[in-house]
Amino acid sequence: MLFKQQVWLRQKLLVLGSLAVGSLLYLVARVGTLDRLQPICPIEGRFGGARSQAEFPLRALQFKRGLLHEFRKGNVSKEQVRLHDLVQQLPKAIIIGVRKGGTRALLEMLNLHPAVVKASQEIHFFDNDENYAKGIEWYRKKMPFSYPQQITIEKSPAYFITEEVPERIYKMNSSIKLLIIVREPTTRAISDYTQVLEGKERKNKTYYKFEKLAIDPNTCEVNTKYKAVRTSIYTKHLERWLKYFPIEQFHIVDGDRLITEPLPELQLVEKFLNLPPRISQYNLYFNATRGFYCLRFNIIFNKCLAGSKGRIHPEVDPSVVTKLRKFFHPFNQKFYQIIGRTLNWP
Ligand code: A3P
């Protein structure tokens, strides 16, 4: 009998103990959640004002990720989001191109900044007639939640080369900031080809060699009808944009330098966007396995870009490379003249 009572007592104590530990854990978790739900760091004036670094602690960045993460997981209601002033804002800056220039890397790296919020997907609002017909509210609803003082950035590289886009963006916001990331034109064209080739191979299809597409077999000249070549004639596209926006509204990012030395390129963008300098060397580390810089958000969270970024290019006949470089040369000179910056292209 006594033994039974002892067992009963032990079980009771065990249950009570578990309840106490459970409650404690719940409270800790709850406090953690509440902590994440509080606007820890007021971020007023982040966009536009030069402020001291001390005013933008790393915790703001953690909070930004925390709440949105909870919202996506369904742990935070729309009401809580509203209470915390989160809104879906139209972009104040757009990465309009260039395809294969490093647009994803640029967007992800800018997103390291606590005042920047990125639209994760390419929205293709301005270049796709069907999407454009859905109206600006449809576009806004595609944007991530952010604080009013943060800026939203989206990237859709097709914007740069699509005829109708400059006018459409101008109608939305004539003072929007436009980012273009470029790479040495021949390398970019080969990168473009590599992406298409990979798509064909995935579907077990055969595809032409790059040389066959880039050089017209009848004239032995560069084939300007080939899209990968046309996209790399940056000056032609930029001139179309300049009919709507002054050059001051553009910032050109050197995509080749973003690969080898990302920080100075990002600092130039911070300046262009009037953001206080917050991205530091701490946020970027070289990953030898990937052969690229990866992103460090905080002590816990870091990431590299997907494997589809940084593909191995097929070998291209050196005489074709030379021919292409010669072809792009005068266009590049014109491009440098317009943007007021010389890039290290051959
Ligand atoms: P490659 O695959 O030819 O190397 P986009 O995002 O516009 O499609 O551009 C893809 C290119 O971004 C890649 O082209 C790669 O070279 C470049 N890039 C720049 N920084 C990178 C990074 N940190 N990680 C992976 N790719 C990066």
Image (tube, rainbow, N blue to C red):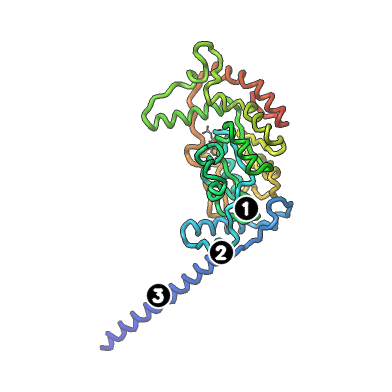
User: What type is the residue that disc 1 sits on?
Assistant: Pro
Query: Regarding mark 3 in the picture, which secondary structure is present there?
Result: helix
Cα distance between the residues tagged 1 and 2: 16 Å
Q: Position of residue 247 (x, y in %)?
A: 71, 35
Q: Is residue 117 visible?
A: yes
Q: Quadrant of residue 109?
A: top right
Check residue 18 in the rendering and tell me which mark sits there, or answer none: 3
Foreground pick, 242 / 30:
242
Check residue 37 in the rendering and tell me which mark sits there, or answer none: 2
Q: Residue at x 28, y 88 (%)?
A: 2
Task: Name the quadrant of the N terminus.
Answer: bottom left
Foreground pick, 246 / 114:
246
Q: Residue at x 59, y 50 (%)?
A: 117
Earlier sequence position, callout 3 versus callout 1: 3
Q: Quadrant of residue 80?
A: bottom right
Cα distance between the residues tagged 3 and 1: 40 Å
User: What type is the residue that disc 2 sits on?
Assistant: Leu
Cα distance between the residues tagged 3 and 2: 28 Å
Q: Position of residue 150 (x, y in %)?
A: 63, 53
Query: Regarding mark 2 in the picture, which secondary structure is present there?
Result: helix
